[in-house]
Image (cartoon, rainbow, N blue to C red):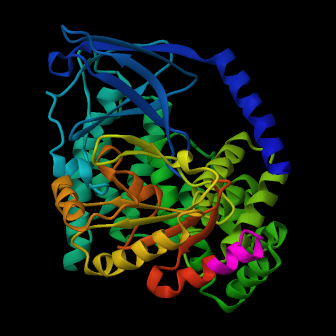
Amino acid sequence: MAFFKKIFRITTILLAFPLALSAQVTLWGNAPSYAGQELVFFKYADYVTQTEEVIARCNVDETGNFKCKLKVDEITYVFNHLGVYRIYLFVEPQKEYQLVLPEYEPKTEQQRLNPFFRETDLHVGIANMEPNDLNYLINSFDLQFNQHFDDIVKNAYTGKPNIPIDSLKNSMEELFVNHNNTFFNSYRDYRYGLLSQLALMQQSRSISNNYFGNKPILYNNPAYMELFNLLFDKYFLFFARSDSGNEGIDKATNQRSYTQLKNTLAQDDVLANDTLLELVVLKGLHDGFFDDRFSRGALLAILDSLYSQSINAEHLLIAENIRTKVTRLLPGFVPSPFELYTLDNKLVKLSQFEGKYVYLNFCTTTSYSCLQEFPLLEKLYEKYKKHLEIVTISIDTEIEDLKVFLDQTNYEWTFLHYGNKPDIVRDFDIRAFPTYFLIGPDRRLITSPAPSPKENFEQQFFNLLRSRGEL
């Protein structure tokens, strides 16, 4: 309860304070190929969880004209998902940007239904851009940087000698010597750090000292945060490579102690700065939640302790986003809501089943394992339909395959197709078919993931009903 009270308090502060300092930014242009569409612009709420936050919406009229207004209080990386493209730009307070959108190219049905399809990143064109504009500077730099980045990656994989980073940096810097934009300076600096790390010209500890030790934390500079996320990736496991580190991490997680964890990690001289140490703990907690070697319950307890003690607004926001991200599939929490269509085009919400148990499963009609279990699901449905609603979400790329299958089998429980919300595969972290979840009448997860019908689900469900006095 304390966690959520503090969420309310700090969210109120975050909402009230930035608005007083925010300045309006206008994005406008003419893009006839997008006529009638809605443009939705996002930013990252934080760069640890990379939670996308909507910051502006606007409609493109029938002639292609659009104008979006948003508010920012600092230079902000803004992006938009446009068909096969993911456009981006950097916006500064009180500025206007005349965008030149790429010709609209929609995703194919196969791309749209593939939750792992990656859009092409494109630094969007700006018609009214001047040579000293931040977007012009960053785009010019990135064109040079990406070429060398690709060369270094190729060399790393082929075992060729490393590219001399210092001379490369010096030659690139000659192009930007007359520019003194603080954000751009930091952007370049941390991009060079990324090259050094990839080229293995310096050890991680040396790079950590040079770029993060006693340096200001640039929470909203993507170059800074990309290098930070790379260097401190799965940091708890990295730190635990030594016997003392392993003992300290184990002790902290076993005791569910944030203080113990901080004291353990503080042995790393790079983390002498308490603010950086706290950010590294947040990154470690985020990564640890997705690693089976750590107890999620222990990490969640440490996260709550950090949240109750931290006075850093950025860290409180990151903690909120981590908690939201990792608890969506934990027993006792409400899973991500969804609205999907049946084959007769009826929209069904998960919330519609409140008051009954829901045995939710993800399947395809081409999976042999799924096909084996459908007859068992039918028996469960007939026996327990007074208490249990079975909901099958089909991940068949072609909805016709599901239609043919149901015409042949006449199964009567609820079948939905994921086509209008392909991200549901990520929302429920589906890695294999079939995957099951048991949701209670209060819409909270009871078992996540749940056993399949072949894994004695019926006996466990029977025992659950009896223990709750429902049989």
Q: Is residue 270 left or right of residue 89?
A: right
- Point out residue 394 in the picture as x, y percentages from the top left corner: 31, 60
| Residue pictured at 78% horizontal, 58% vertical | 304
- Point out residue 168 in the picture as x, y percentages from the top left corner: 28, 54
Q: Is residue 60 magenta?
A: no
| Residue pictured at 70% horizontal, 69% vertical | 299
Q: Is residue 105 above or below residue 159?
A: above
Q: Nearer the viewer, residue 447 or 93?
A: 447
Residue 391 falls in image quadrant: bottom left
Q: Quadrant of the C terminus?
A: bottom right
- Point out residue 377 in the picture as x, y percentages from the top left corner: 42, 74
Q: Is residue 206 left or right of residue 361?
A: right
- Identify the magenta region: 462-471
Residue 312 falls in image quadrant: top right
Q: Is residue 463 magenta?
A: yes
Q: Is residue 19 left or right of residue 69?
A: right
Q: Is residue 191 left or right of residue 295?
A: left
Q: Would you say the magenta stretch is mainly helix, strand or loop?
A: helix
Q: Nearer the viewer, residue 127 or 416?
A: 416
| Residue pictured at 58% horizontal, 23% vertical | 73
| Residue pictured at 71% horizontal, 30% vertical | 14
Q: Is residue 468 visible?
A: yes
Residue 252 falls in image quadrant: bottom right
Q: Nearer the viewer, residue 136 or 48?
A: 48
- Point out residue 139 in the picture as x, y percentages from the top left corner: 28, 35
